[in-house]
Image (cartoon, helix red, strand yellow):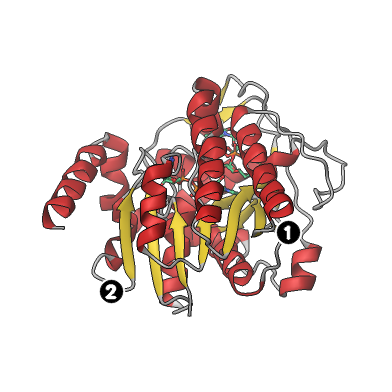
Amino acid sequence: MDTILVTGGCGFIGSNFIRHVLQEQLVAKLINVDLLTYAGNPANLADFEDDERYVFYRADIADEEAINEILSTHQVDVLLNFAAESHVDRSIVDPQAFVRTNLVGTSTLLNAARKQNVPRYIQISTDEVYGSLSFDDPAFTEQTALNPRNPYSAAKAGGDMLVLAHEHTFGINACVTRCSNNYGPYQFPEKLIPLMLLNAMDGKPLPVYGTGENIRDWIHVEDHCRGIAAVLQHGQTGRVYHFGGDCELQNIDVVRRIIEAAGASEEQITYVKDRPGHDMRYAMNFEETTKELGWTPRISFEEGLAATAQWYRDNQSWWKPIVSGDYLEWIEQWYGERKGAA
Ligand code: NAD
Ligand code: DAU
């Protein structure tokens, strides 16, 4: 079994992926490298802190010296890059942070992985790199030209291209995964579903951007993580793997279903100013992935949303410190104690 290095493992998808591979015993050792930005929360992995297979480093993926040191300390078989600035609205306020992590950070990881002879690299990416579809366009395929339209997706597209260029130029073993909108446990409550769930439960306004007609394809994070694990086990170099939930919904429909799941009121819906450059529709064609890896999504939106609503109801001790902002102080204290003990 392999030693894998996961970056961004304290975030939403990274922490769900770590939980998946450790619970399923798919790896011998797992090194998590995370900067612990506002989106990285060690509480997401509290149950694995004492697991002998799990090692944590606080480091920036754009810091080549730090990455080189970690890679020279451990014999890593596969590096999976989940680390990113991930929220589109923030990228409109501060594009530079997105270029640094999503583009420069990816380049730094590739360079370090090549120098340290890491045998395989997997880049976790997004359907947003293809840009926006109109209502009757066919879904994105692996051959669709990249056409990112906001600073987040532009920086992710640049990162993907660097990965594929390194595969071509230097002959490293590398591939890219692209997925649609994830939801599920441990998602930071700035994204549509957890934000609306918490506001709905609390009787607060539900801010719908523009007309609410924009379409996203929703996939439960466990389905996505199972897909990435399949790539880890059977993925081929130079490939792009698509994952999707086969569940296209207008935002307003998602919000109405959340209202139902939370027992809230339609009167809480508040239409607000649209996101600048708001992409209209994303949709993923994942037939190639199914053919090659046998992967399909298993969790229906009804089932996944009900489970997610229940998770947020049951885990107030996770999200309350996030909503109040107290978690940032807790993280520094957690990290200080950990460093002190090392
Ligand atoms: P997230 O924002 O929840 O987590 C990002 C993690 O990366 C955090 O733990 C953060 O601390 C860490 N990080 C940020 N900058 C870093 C840096 N410079 N060095 C080291 N660590 C850093 O993001 P997410 O939603 O879990 O997304 C994970 C990956 O999946 C991203 O690459 C994203 O583009 C991709 N993706 C997300 C979705 C989605 O719906 N959330 C869909 C498809 C693809
Ligand atoms: O498609 C994959 C992408 O999905 C990932 O690459 C990104 O990391 C992830 O953040 C997500 O991007 P979106 O912009 O689609 O997700 P977000 O949850 O921010 O918004 C989903 C839709 O809901 C979008 O059309 C904007 C709208 N929205 C969002 C928020 C936060 C609202 O109407 N109101 C809101 O308050």
Which disc, if any, is residue 238?
1
Describe residue 204's horizontal placement relative to residue 277 as left or right: left
Mark 2 residue crowding within 10 angstroms, few (<14) / some (14–19) / many (20+): few
Q: Earlier in the sequence, mark 1 or mark 2?
A: 2
Q: Position of residue 177 (x, y in %)?
A: 65, 56
Q: Is residue 49 above or below residue 159?
A: below
Residue that appears at 43% across and 64% down: 18
Q: Residue 229 location in percent, x, y?
A: 57, 69
- Residue 78 screen position, x and y as percent: 52, 65
- Seen at 83% across and 39% down, the residue is 135
Say which element carries label 1: loop
Q: Nearer the viewer, residue 174 or 242?
A: 174
User: Which residue type does callout 2 highlight?
Assistant: Glu
| Residue at 54%, 30% in the rendered image | 99
Left or right of 156 in this view: 262: left
Residue ID for mark 2 = 52
From the viewer's side, name the closer residue of 92 and 26: 26
Which is closer to the viewer, label 1 or label 2? 1
Residue 94 vertical position relative to residue 153 in the rendered view, above or below: above
Q: Is residue 237 above or below residue 278?
A: below
The picture places residue 173, in percent across and down from the top left corner, at 65, 62
Q: What kind of element bears circle 2?
A: loop
Residue 216 seen in the figure = no
Check disc 1 and give the amino acid type: Gly
- Rendered residue at 61%/28% (across/down): 151
Q: Is residue 134 visible?
A: yes
Q: Which mark is residue 201?
A: none
The answer as to whether callout 1 falls within 8 Å of ligand 1 is no
